[in-house]
Image (cartoon, coloured by chain):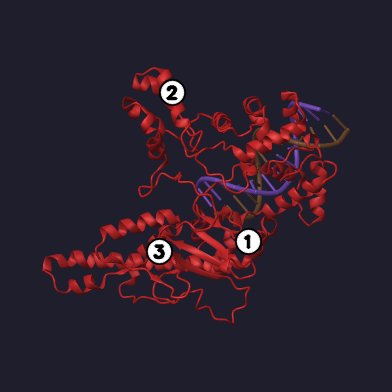
Chain colours: A red, B brown, C purple
DNA sequence: CTATGGCACGGATT
DNA sequence: AATCCGTGCCATAG
């Protein structure tokens, strides 16, 4: 691309590298914050107004031509297009049910969960209880569950437990419903209650199922549960489906995509992608377009007026200004560096994992960060930082952690799922291991068991051939 | 006796 | 240096 002049490079380089590293590891949201604050604190920086591509109306970064429209026609449709995509909203316009639930505590810009809930319940809240409610709300964990015991709160604030309880109830009925519960079970029960109040048919045994058999439920031990509830496994299956589709054990997490994974071993949930992969013009046959989100609506650069003015001001201020200029230029340089690295990384990833992006988990190729680092000629930690804490939105609308691209066993696990989904008689772990070996996936029996657990699949003896799914 | 889950160790990855 | 992951060994349940 383009380099800036290197005048006093030597000692700058370390600072440069350090800052580029930091920027790399930032999430889109965090980057947004960072840029805002830098912009506010340094007068030498300015944001020039947004530029849009005349033909596709896409926001553009810097003065380069639109990466999509100016794409040479000679490119094969197999080549992914990777580019930096500035967006103010940095939420894609795709059909993902986004709820206004920032779960990260970094959001000074957006409304956070506590205030969001507080606002809702304010009308019904006795003003005197406001502080109490606020206290409760600030003690939610990232899943929206209450982490302190009511009794402690009551003692701490010198009020009756019953009063705290009633406030808690108020909170629980606010959006997202169930927030402020002490346990996932409790949250789900509240959600059931609300559903019932809205005349939505709720399976009769759902309440008991959650109360008595949550652990069984989450482990898919339906036959066991059926026994306890004195009903048929089929019925339990239905209840489980209902619960999976309509309830959310962690109120603060939005539940898009397949909710049946809710019981699966913890899959981290993001609401905002840092990178969006799509097909060109939504055309499934078109080449892949990889957008690296830049959470700004224009181009960041050094204010030329400022530079100009540096020459004409009073002596004693010159140093300050020079300093500001220096910082500003370092910052934009680092930002460019970051973007460049991101581009290269995504280019490679998109090529490597295209099958995975297109067809799903079975086609993931096991790639390690170290390998990639070697190919791109960067330090391993660079890749690690670039990957961690970031989320990617796939063409099918799902948002997955970037780290998933480096999962070494995902393809085997999906193969395992496929085998089990198609089995007629429940295979034992040993048999499964053999079957997998036949597919060139050589893993030990013990490992099969672990994979099963990860996928939330029952052991053979508890597994009937009732495993079907919508 | 067979099938699984738990603990812990060693090597690979980050 | 810290962490993750695959495995082997052993205890336990059926």
What residue would you read off at disc 3?
A17
Q: Earlier in the sequence, mark 2 or mark 3?
A: 3
Whether marks 1 and 3 lie on the same chain? yes
Instruction: Give the chain of mark 3.
Output: A
Residue C13 in the figure: left or right of residue A92: right
What residue would you read off at disc 1?
A357
Dot in front, 1 or 2: 2
- Residue nearer the viewer, A445 or A465: A465
Q: Earlier in the sequence, mark 1 or mark 3?
A: 3
- Secondary-structure class at tag 3: helix
Residue A120 in the figure: left or right of residue A254: left
| Quadrant containing the N terminus of chain A in the rendered view | bottom left
Percent of width and height locating residue A154 = 39, 21
* Quadrant of the image occupied by residue A41: bottom left
* Quadrant of the image occupied by residue A463: top right
Whether marks 1 and 2 lie on the same chain? yes
**Residue at screen point 48% across, 32% down:** A173
Q: Earlier in the sequence, mark 1 or mark 2?
A: 2
- Secondary-structure class at tag 1: helix
What residue would you read off at disc 2?
A166
């Amino acid at each position: 691309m383009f380099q800036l002049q290197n005048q006093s490079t030597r000692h700058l380089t370390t600072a440069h590298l350090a800052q580029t590293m930091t920027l790399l590891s930032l999430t889109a949201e965090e980057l947004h914050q960072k840029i805002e604050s830098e912009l506010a604190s340094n007068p030498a920086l300015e944001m020039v107004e947004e530029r849009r591509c005349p033909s596709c109306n896409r926001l553009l970064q810097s003065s380069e031509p639109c990466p999509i429209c100016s794409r040479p026609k000679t490119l094969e449709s197999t080549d992914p297009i990777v580019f930096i995509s500035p967006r103010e909203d940095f939420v894609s316009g795709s059909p993902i049910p986004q709820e206004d639930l920032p779960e990260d505590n970094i959001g000074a810009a957006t409304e956070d969960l506590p205030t969001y809930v507080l606002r809702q319940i304010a009308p019904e809240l006795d003003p005197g209880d406001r502080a109490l409610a606020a206290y409760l709300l600030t003690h939610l964990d990232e899943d929206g569950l209450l982490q302190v015991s009511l009794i402690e709160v009551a003692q701490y604030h010198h009020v009756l437990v019953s009063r705290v309880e009633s406030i808690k109830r108020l909170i629980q009925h606010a959006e997202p419903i169930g927030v402020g519960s002490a346990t996932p079970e409790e949250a789900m029960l509240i959600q059931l209650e609300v559903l019932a109040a809205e005349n939505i048919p709720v399976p009769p045994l759902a309440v008991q199922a959650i109360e008595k058999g949550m652990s069984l439920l989450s482990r898919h031990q339906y036959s066991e549960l059926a026994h306890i509830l004195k009903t048929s496994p089929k019925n339990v299956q239905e209840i489980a489906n209902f619960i999976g589709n309509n309830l959310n054990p962690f109120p603060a997490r939005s539940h898009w995509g397949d909710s049946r994974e809710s019981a699966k071993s913890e899959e981290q949930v993001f609401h905002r992608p840092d990178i969006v992969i799509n097909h060109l013009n939504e055309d499934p046959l078109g080449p892949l377009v990889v957008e690296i989100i830049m959470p700004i609506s224009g181009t960041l650069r050094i204010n030329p007026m400022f530079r100009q003015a540096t020459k004409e001001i009073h002596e004693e201020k010159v140093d300050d200004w020079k300093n500001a200029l220096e910082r500003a230029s370092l910052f934009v340089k680092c930002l460019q560096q970051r973007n460049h690295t991101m581009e290269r990384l995504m280019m490679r990833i998109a090529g490597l994992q295209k099958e995975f992006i297109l067809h799903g988990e079975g086609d993931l190729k096991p790639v390690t960060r170290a390998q990639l680092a070697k190919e791109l000629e960067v330090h391993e930690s660079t890749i690690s930082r670039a990957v961690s804490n970031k989320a990617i939105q796939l063409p099918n609308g799902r948002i997955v952690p970037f780290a998933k691209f480096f999962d070494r066993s995902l393809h085997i696990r999906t193969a395992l799922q496929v085998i089990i989904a198609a089995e007629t008689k429940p295979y034992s772990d040993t048999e499964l291991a053999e079957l997998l070996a036949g597919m060139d996936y050589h893993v030990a029996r013990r490992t099969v068991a672990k994979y099963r657990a990860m996928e939330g699949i029952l052991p053979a003896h508890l597994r009937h051939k009732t495993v079907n799914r919508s």
